[in-house]
Image (spheres, helix red, strand yellow):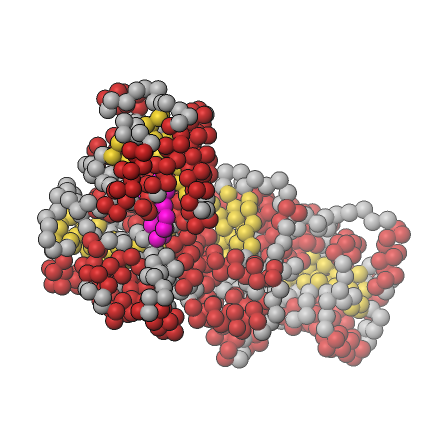
Amino acid sequence: MNIAFDAAAIFGPMSKNRGIGNYAVDQFKTMIQRDTENRYFLLNFFEDVNMDNWLPESENFSSHYFYCGKDNFLLSNPEYQEVIGDIIKKFNREYSIDIFYITSPFESRNVKYKKEWFGNVNVVATVYDIIPYVFKDRYIADSDTYEWYMSCIEMLKWIDKLYVISNSVKDDMIKYLEFDPNQIDVIYGAVSEMYKEIEISEGQVNSLFSKFGIENDYIMCTGGDDDRKNIGSLILAYSKMPAELIEKYQLVVVCKLSAEAVDKYIKIINENGIAGRVILTNFVSSSELIQLYNKAYLMAFPSQYEGFGLPIVEAWACGTPVLTSDNSSLGEIAAESAILVNPFEVQSITEGLVYALKRADLDEFIEKGRKRLEKFRWNVVADATIELLNQLVEKKVSNDTKQKAREKIAFFTPLPPLQSGISDYSVDIIGELSQYFDIDVYIDNGYKANCELADNVNIYNHKKFKKKEAGYFDIVYQMGNSEYHEYMMPYIKANKGTVVLHDYNLHSLLQYLTLYKQSNNMKQYEKYLLEDFDIETVEEYLKNLQNRTTDIEISGMELNGCVSNYANKIIVHSDEAREKLLTRNIGRNVRCIRHYAKIESLVDKSTLKTKNNFLEDEIVIASFGHIHETKRAIPILKAFAMLCKKYNNLRYNFVGKLDKGIKNNFEDIVQQHNLGELVTVTGYTELEQFEEFIDFTDICVNLRHPYNGETSGSLMRELAKGKCVLINNLGSFSEIPDEGCVKIPPVSEMQEHEEVQAIYDALEALVEDRARIDEIGMKAREYAIKNLALDKIGIHYKNFICNQEKSAITEKIMKDIIGYELIDKSYNSEEVKQLATTLGYSKSYMH
């Protein structure tokens, strides 16, 4: 089980180093130390603290800090609430959180949690008291404070379980706020290990007493600067004791007090003639506090209301008897182990003091206190918390197990027999998605699909979409850089859905459609350009184009806005494409889902070589797909010719159709270097034969230039089949791990002869070390199994389609943060970096 707890109680400004904060620190520290079966995660929006000092050598604990800017503006400004929400959703998903623990639900500087952020994650919270509501005329009298407090109460209403620190708190929540009793469990507070009986030397006692003006035995009161602590009534009650008791026992009030409070209490002291007998220590150190507890004759704590009453157990731990109130949690915690009084009646407090100092067997109360204290140890609290958390996970039924109605999606794509890699891709993706959705596939005019699909998949001509469009959960568009995708472009603009952008740059398609197919339709070409560039840039470019001072800038002016600007969601196959899309508009919902690969059993390469008339000891090198300038066929052929001068056991297969544009040059090189028997061009092959060629290939070459942001289906197949592949180090290709391929620089960084030499050098190194070919192939297959398996890609698709949420990070929010925060408040470079990391994590929730 994975348990996350927020840092509000530990580092929040209202709770840090106070009762709530100390409770949370001790509770979770003990849980983590005692519970080795579960993992714990601290989600911290407050302070960047090294937690190794807090929990050294804890393998089941990790801390995660997110910088929220100066003054924690991301937390405190409601405008950014959903930014924090996306962080929480991403965090819960990334670490498979089962339970999220809210440690201080009334922390004013913390975010207001929303139920929808947590999905199937169990949410629990500790409620220490509802004192502000019980005494609302005193604490939340103004409307703004009351409204804020009640918003916290509303948040508590939807939380799965509330853990309160006494039955008194539970009873009050039911009585005053109508909480369901079954929602609330009691987990008592406990005493810190620092409170204990200690030996104090005579010198230490003299120093302590001298510092605070203590002259003899004393009654100790630890309270706070709050009328509810009832210090004024205690002083008054003390003044009404018999004179001999006042003479014998001083009253020492140990807590930090404001100047106003000091003046108020001194006035009571003077008016009642007990000057010199009551000491107001103001702030004391922890060590002084423990010494004062140990030396006290009696600890008096007649508070009007407490959620738990830590001074009771602290005094018991130091071997000191206790007088406290008979109301709220105080009577519950003290039970018969302390002297109880009515805190609202001064006479009752006086009588209790007199009884304690004259007639009570305080040694008996000390012993009772020691025994009762064992209920309030942190190991007891931790074990109780762990048990309740385990029960909660066992009882909660995941919504994922409930039967949901199957949604229907529309799917625009080319299909076989069209000779397109996306056609084959879509057949497999549709096969995976048909497990989760009913699917209507819409294809272009002029052909009949030739492929086997599941029974719940129907194929229609796209013209039938209009009558059926209202019934779809989502519309998926498989958009590529060929005219096979032209038919879907009007639908993308009119019917927003999920666009799968196989090629980041669609410029070659758009210029073909407008300048060639539509006979120089410059107006439409201009419209496409304006989807991605400002009017000044477009006008300048078109002017130069018409004046013939520039060529068509396919690579220099990347276009996709004609589809990406109208998509609800976008799927790309590389991190590079995703980053480019978000750079143009951070508000886009973009997910990188890798191109898939079918993970199948490996076949015997030697057998297939023999079957296809290759010798077993020959090294077979191959390129796959359309044999085109962009696949670098000519430089490859030149490099292969150089290799053949040194080695006589090489063969090269170009598995695909030879493009007319390079046919003459290609054939001239083959003839010039006598490569006719060593180089084979297969022409178009069916998929089964295509894959067989990959199976018996030793080295695959998959190069690109120019690069349009595309991915390669053949490359995915090569990796899945455990092939050593030579690629250019650019775009999506560069994202393949170095150990799983061989990379040469992008063509743009080399001159023609340098490219040929780079190909030659890479292939020569492999030919010289055949063991390395196998090692790289093994790493390639490991990468494919982990990241490219078709079933995993199908699940990524399904999850992204089903997720109808939008990222909280928008262009407006980023402009506000940059303008109002980073610039106006003069962030340094490290602060900017930290804030960018936080915002990036929030944005990545959608990925």
292 or 359, which is in the foreground? 292
Q: Quadrant of residue 508?
A: bottom left
User: In the figure, is residue 197 to the left or right of 706?
Assistant: right
526 or 562, which is in the foreground? 526
Which x, y percent locates residue 480? Answer: 27, 53
665 or 215, which is in the foreground? 665
User: In the figure, is residue 592 to the left or right of 284?
Assistant: left
Which x, y percent locates residue 122? Answer: 42, 52
- Is residue 320 depicted above or below 154 in this figure? above
Residue 55 forms part of the magenta stretch: no
Q: Give the range drawn in magenta.
A: 702-712
Q: How many labels does the image show?
A: 0
103 or 369, which is in the foreground? 103
Which residue is found at the position 13% from the left and 63% from the top?
Answer: 466
Q: Quadrant of residue 754?
A: top left
- Is residue 34 depicted above or below 161 in this figure? above
Image quadrant in which the N terminus is located: top left
Q: Quadrant of residue 137?
A: bottom right
Which x, y percent locates residue 85? Answer: 44, 61
User: In the figure, is residue 335 to the left or right of 358?
Assistant: left
Which residue is found at the position 42% from the left and 45% from the top?
Answer: 752
Which x, y percent locates residue 432? Answer: 24, 44
Residue 705 forms part of the magenta stretch: yes
Q: Can residue 721 be seen in this view?
A: no
